[in-house]
Image: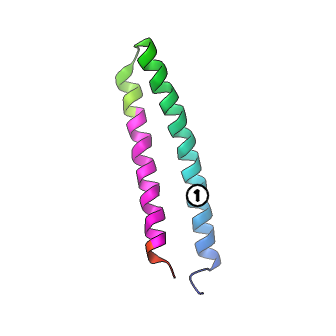
Amino acid sequence: MAWLNEQLWQGLDALEARHQEIQRDHDNAWRGLRIVLQDGIDYPEAWHRYCEVVAELDRTAAEFELLRARGP
């Protein structure tokens, strides 16, 4: 199983760590957006930040899909 080499695992570990970090950012952005909606302050900035984080989650999901598609 040549595809199960150390380089793959290092890349997968790095991608998973990045994905988890972005997921935390998403949770924070979502909470921030909810607060802004309740308080009615600075909505455009909070919405922009939330959309940026969602886009980054999509990018990491696409990277996982590329790894899966390459497979063994």
Prevailing SS of the magenta stretch: helix
| Place of residue 16 in the rendered image (x, y in percent of width and height, measured from the top left) | 58, 57
Q: Residues within 10 Å of mark 1 (few under 14, many from 20)?
A: some
Q: Which quadrant of the view contains residue 11?
A: bottom right
Residue reaching furthest left?
A: 44
Query: Image quadrant of residue 66?
Result: bottom left
Image coordinates for residue 6, horizontal then vertical, percent: 65, 76
Quadrant of the drawing holding the N terminus:
bottom right
Is the residue 39 above or below the residue 11 in the image? above
Residue shown at 52% from the left, 28% from the top? 31
Picture quadrant where residue 52 is located: top left
Task: Provide the residue span drawn in magenta.
Answer: 49-68
User: Vertically, is 56 above or below 28?
Assistant: below
| Residue 22 image offset from top left, x and y in percent | 53, 45
Q: Is residue 52 magenta?
A: yes
Up/down of 42 relative to 3, above or below = above
The image shows residue 8 at horizontal and vertical percentages of 58, 73
- Residue at 43% x, 48% y is 56
Q: Residue at x 45, y 12 (%)?
A: 39
User: Which residue in the structure is indicated by mark 1?
Assistant: 16
Q: Which type of secondary structure does the marked residue at label 1 adopt?
A: helix
User: What is the basis of the colouring in this image?
Assistant: rainbow
Residue at (39% x, 18% y) in the render? 42
For this view, does 21 lie left or right of residue 52? right
Q: Is residue 17 left or right of residue 38?
A: right
Q: Looking at the image, which residue sits at the far bottom? A: 1
Q: Is residue 23 left or right of residue 42?
A: right
In the rendered view, tell whether residue 39 sits above or below residue 9: above
Residue 25 falls within the magenta-colored stretch: no
